Amino acid sequence: MANRVISEMGLPKSISNVFAARNLITAKILFFLETRDVLSLTEFDLMELLDIGLSEVVSAIAHISEITCPPYQTALSLWKQHSQTENHPSFLPTHLNGLDAALCGGIPNGVLTEVVGPAGIGKTQFCLKLSLLASLPKTYGGLCGKVIYIDVESKFSSKRLIEIGFNSFPELFRMKGMAEEMAGRIVVLQPESLSEFTESLQQIKVLLLQQQVKLLIVDSMTALVSGEYEQGHSRQNQLGWHISFIKSLAELSQIPVVLTNQVRSQSFDQISRYSFEGPIQFGNKDPTRSDSHLVAALGINWAHAVTIRLVLEAISGQRYIKVAKSPISPPLAFPFIVSASGILLLSDDGREMAGPQVNTIRHQGHSAIMHSMQEDCHQSD
């Protein structure tokens, strides 16, 4: 709500004109190259910036606050709202029963869901299956809607999408023209840079509002920001702006938004510095050695922005999908495989995790998995 247009807030004309003259169009302001909320500025800052009196500033702030701040709700009112909307799903089922049960139905609407893991572990496979499920008719457990798929690394495969469809829903996809209809509901954008992606965000916002879009996927967010800016303040500012915009898209459209993230190595010195669980032992390795393990990329601000974090990892050649962050589920790990019909859980009973293993991303035997995947692909070709 903080990006509401100030001219539409019913302020006195004289005050509204002053805001417009200072190029303060919304409740946010570009101030010393940083995005700052008008409501975070002091009365004296605004007096100096707008060149008006204290009483006028106080009155304007009170008026803007009343409009932009959401009203309070009680637990009773939220429960009644939930009861009234039970017949309108607020999530996208993944058709992975154990995962859906842990997430109380599936990938939730209106928030960011992150899928993070090493290259080749199955992140894009997961996204392809979600795209298919969102486009399916409701009688088959889908959302019967369109999908916007931001394919940053050119990994989207229409051939693989149709293969997953034929193997997951053979009766539906054998109907004449059904494969073409499902594929036609998925809009694929392939920005070549962060600036190109930024320019397309307004177009994406219009598509979300004007069309029956039921899912937005960005695969991958890491590739968008990598190499575009040097590490540091400038890159974090850019990433922060995009996080805010994408979160606003999720809240505005009330659809699931799924973003994939890559991994980076982290030394044991960094682990012990930030861990509250004490030294992390990996087999017989000495944590004082200069060694590393994998963690999610993009940093702590990004981690706070996502509501659900699903981690894909490999241990001794076996893949696992972990619910590493969720407000409604304990940390759970499910073994899975990638088959002709997409990702399949080997067990619907998740193993509970604790301590560092929740956020640690392991890849033991991962090279063997990737080699096996390449052989399967050659055989299918």
Image (cartoon, rainbow, N blue to C red):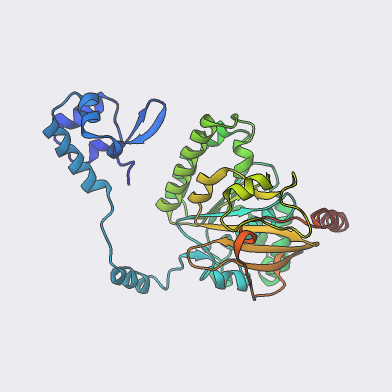
Report x, y in % for residue 48.
22, 24
**Does residue 73 appear anywhere in the picture?**
yes
Residue lying at 46% horizontally and 38% vertically, measured from the top left: 241
**Does residue 210 appear anywhere in the picture?**
no
Closest to the observer, 352 or 248: 352
Report x, y in % for residue 41.
28, 35
Residue lying at 45% horizontally and 42% vertically, measured from the top left: 245
Q: Can you say which quadrant of the picture contains the C terminus? A: bottom right
Residue 352 vertical position relative to residue 70 in the rendered view, above or below: below
Closest to the observer, 156 or 322: 322
Report x, y in % for residue 118.
71, 51
- Left or right: residue 188 versus residue 9 is right
- Left or right: residue 128 versus residue 42 is right
Closest to the observer, 78 or 53: 53
Q: Quadrant of residue 229?
A: top right
- Left or right: residue 10 versus residue 68 is left
Report x, y in % for residue 315.
76, 61
Residue projecting furthest to the left: 55
- Left or right: residue 379 versus residue 309 is right
Residue lying at 11% horizontally and 34% vertically, measured from the top left: 55
